Image (spheres, grey):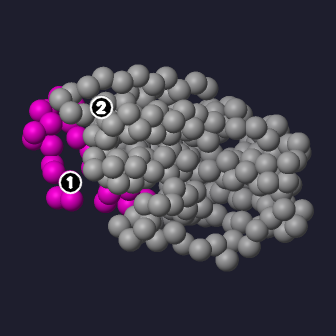
Amino acid sequence: MNKGITLEIPSQVEYLSLVRAVVASAASLDQSLGDQRIDDLRLAVSEATTNAIRAHARLDSNERITIRFGIDGDRIEVEVQDRGSGFDPEKLDPAGPLTDTGRLEYEGGFGIPLMKILADEITIESADEGTTVNLVVFVSPPSEKLNNQD
Amino acid sequence: MMLTLSHSTIGAWTIIHVVGEVDMATGPQLRQEIVRHVSEGNVHIVVDLQNVDFLDSTGLGILVGGVKRARSNGGDFRCSGLSSSLQEVFSLTGLDSVLSSVDLNQDPSTWTPLNE
């Protein structure tokens, strides 16, 4: 990353808006990234940070959460790292469509699917020592790049 | 970041006006407000999101809970004032399939009935 910043925050929900503000401001330094894509990145990073705060809360942990932001060419990358107890991303049960019977009983299940939709690339590495979520947004989405090559 | 909540009425409908960002920090305020209105018998609710420029999965869940609470008490639950970003999130998550948007400038009798 030739342009990068690192943010370390206490594991408290009050810091979510700060993370969003920093990420949106940093992403807007690349003036070719449209407002909609900045909103997508802001939401995806907020979801990852929310999950990190929840992971620390489950352990009653005071560890800090690290957010690394970088721009490298047409690639904007944000990494959110916690020191929670980890989880197996492959074993998450999809909550199902909201029109399914009984789905309205459950308020959760939106966070990780949203991250997967909003980011162009997402990697979740999780172990007993913590979880790292890597989110990538391309300044020109991959589909546009392919079209531009025609 | 604070969430500012106020309410008004249009006919039988209670309109909850939300100003700010809805996330894990502020969402509980909105949930509490919805629960309070339903428990007071105001089961026809519109959440006005015109002045909300951020709403995350916590907020989506609270709206899902609002739909469930209002309907299970014989009422209905709608939203209004969605920005293009919020419209995108509602569409991506399928929330727009159970939570329809209304125009507060129109008479409620013109709003699409439930399940149409």
Query: Which one is nearer the viewer's eye here, B9 or B79?
Result: B9
Marked residue chain, label 2: B
Give residue A140's mark. none
Q: Residue A85: percent from the left, percent from the top?
A: 84, 62
Q: Earlier in the sequence, mark 2 or mark 1?
A: 2
- Asked if the stretch drawn in magenta spans residue B98, the answer is yes
Question: Along the horizontal axis of the image, is B42 left or right of B65?
Answer: left
Answer with the quarter of the image where residue B14 lies: top left
What secondary structure prevails in the magenta region? Answer: loop
Up/down of A69 relative to A99, above or below:
above
Residue under circle 1?
B114
Extreme-bottom residue of the structure: A91
Element class at badge 1? loop
Inspect the image, locate mark 2, and give the three-letter code of the amino acid beneath it: Thr
- Asked if the stretch drawn in magenta spans residue A115, the answer is no
Find the distance from the CA under tag 2 to the CA under tag 1: 16 Å
Up/down of B97 relative to B81, above or below:
below
Question: Along the horizontal axis of the image, is B100 left or right of A143?
Answer: left
Q: Residue A113: percent from the left, percent from the top?
A: 54, 63
- Range of magenta residues: B90-116
Marked residue chain, label 1: B
Query: Which one is nearer the viewer's eye here, B40 or A86?
Result: B40
Inspect the image, locate mark 1, and give the three-letter code of the amino acid beneath it: Leu
Q: Crowding at label 2, few (<14), some or many (≥20) Cα neighbours within 10 Å?
A: many
Q: Is residue A1 visible to us here?
A: no
Q: Residue B88: percent from the left, percent from the top?
A: 39, 51
Residue under circle 2?
B14
Query: Which one is nearer the viewer's eye here, A35 or A99?
Result: A99
Residue at 63% over, 57% down: A136
Q: Residue A110: percent from the left, percent from the top?
A: 53, 58
